[in-house]
Amino acid sequence: MKAKELHDLGAEELKDKERELYQELFNLRFQKATGQLGNTAMLNKAKRDLARVKTVLREMEQAAG
């Protein structure tokens, strides 16, 4: 997901996306621990997407306050 796409979303949508990414990251870590994760690059992708969402949320908070 690109940061430009995230800037178009509202605050509630971003918070939902953040929760979704936390859940995805948890599931990927669980799969890795049990040896079921084939593509470990998905972990890094999920972490980066989560960081992008958190960054955009923080930018929105600073702009509003």
Image (cartoon, helix red, strand yellow):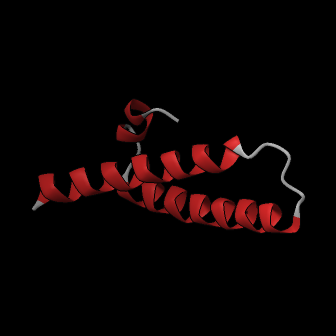
Q: Residue 12 placed where, x, y %? A: 42, 60
**Could you tell me which quadrant the C terminus lies in?**
bottom left
Q: Is residue 27 above or below residue 48?
A: below
Q: Is residue 41 above or below residue 59?
A: above
Place residue 36 in its image quadrant.
bottom right
Q: Residue at x 38, y 31 (%)?
A: 4
Q: Position of residue 48 (x, y in %)?
A: 49, 46
> Height in image: 11 above or below 22?
above
Front-most of residues 52 and 47: 47
Q: Is residue 22 left or right of residue 54?
A: right
User: How many numbered discs, if any?
Assistant: 0
Determine the image quadrant of residue 23.
bottom right
Q: Position of residue 49 (x, y in %)?
A: 51, 46
Residue 23 in the figure: left or right of residue 28: left
Q: Taking 6 as reference, is 58 above or below it?
A: below
The residue depicted at 32 percent of the width and 55 percent of the height is 57
Q: Residue at 67% across / 59% down in the picture?
A: 24
Taking the spot 26% from the left edge, 57% from the top edge, the residue there is 58
Closer to us: 17 or 50: 50
Q: Quadrant of residue 11?
A: bottom left
Q: Foreground residue, 16 or 58?
A: 58
Side of 25 relative to 35 (left or right) = left
Q: Can you name the residue that lies furthest to the left here?
A: 65
- Nearest the eye: 35 or 18: 35
